[in-house]
Image (cartoon, helix red, strand yellow):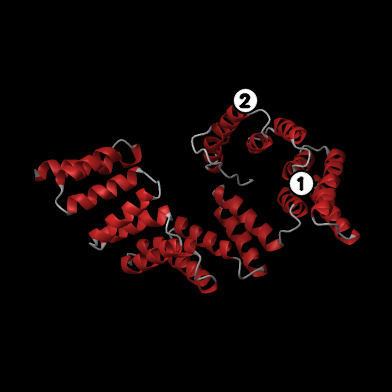
Amino acid sequence: MIHLRKEADRLSPFNRGVDAYNRRDFFLAAQEFCRAVNEHPNYADYRFALAMAYRELGQLGSAIESLREALRINPNYVQAKSELAILLAMNEQYEDAQETYREVVSHFIYDSGGASGGVVEELLEVFQKGLEQLREGAYGDAVLAFRRATNPKLSMSEIHFNQAVDYFLGDELEAAKVELEQALRLDPFLIDAYVLSCRIGQVEGDYEKAFEACRRAIEIAPDYPDLHYHLALTCCALDDFERARDELERAVQLRPEYSAALLELAQVSLELGQLDRAQECLEDYAAAGHSSARSDFLLGRCYEEQGRQESARRQYEKAARDSEWAEEARSRLACLDVDS
């Protein structure tokens, strides 16, 4: 699964497609990407994204056609050409796949200012090995080979990590852990692998494992805000709110606009009775241009604790418009009615 990034216009069909794609709703993603293509038929990136959605839906023919359109618009779109080579192979169009991959290699040579014949031959051998593994039915090994061949700057540890991410997103946690072990064995300093290991621990409820993964990563990269954030979430699950607060303070110190950390810090500060700090975090969150039902609810809690009943009521009413927060917000509203 290719990881897609949003563009500036957060309400665009493309961004809605990216959101759907990243939560693995590929049918909706394809619909939104089709809308984006219809609005801007000469945007190669939109056609590439549509191809990736088709691929995940198993519609290889449509995916190949969409990639060909992207390359018609931008013949030097190396990622599109790389993915086309892989999909042609998966569609058992082996000769076309080899020819397309040779064009990919020519781009690598040009972009790097020239490459030795040995490097070129190695890349071609890796891709050929993938084709052989595909013919033998070793799909997983073939995908790893294709990823290595089409991303020559990636190390094997990064390839295993990327495969672990795909397994994690597909809820195949045991397979993800196997890939992570291989990634960390090859590169013990691969920070993102520790973050993913922490996330797996959190999902499985193994918070001690999650804590240890983050702790080890912070020893390597103490200024990586995501590590402090995930360690804080783990501390919350272990009811260590003071340690969680300290880790969140460090995260927002390193990245002041870190919206998720600001919200979590507001929540933890409320748990610790630090109302002023909670409200300050929510103000920083809003000042950074963020808004959410959770922030409305937490601000309502601040106001309620401060005895500002009407202000609290307005915030809870706003939060109640969101289905995810409706039940909790209405519960607080009911408490306000009783108190009044």
* 284, above or below 339, in the image: below
* 25, above or below 302, in the image: above
Give the left or right position of residue 230, taking residue 91 as reference: left
Q: Secondary structure at mark 2?
A: helix
Q: Which residue is at 75% across, 37% downward?
A: 74
Among the 4 quarters of the image, the one containing residue 154: bottom right
Residue 206: in sight, yes or no? no
- Percent x, y of residue 79: 72, 45
Callout 2 crowding tier (Cα within 10 Å): few <14, some 14–19, many ≥20: few
Residue 95: in sight, yes or no? yes
| Residue sticking out furthest to the bottom | 219
Among the 4 quarters of the image, the one containing residue 26: top right
Q: Nearer the viewer, mark 1 or mark 2?
A: 2
- Sequence-wise, the earlier of marks 1 and 2 is 2
Provide the residue designation for mark 2. Answer: 38
- Percent x, y of residue 164: 61, 55
Q: Of the numbered discs in the image, which one, if any, rests on residue 137? A: 1
- Percent x, y of residue 9: 52, 38
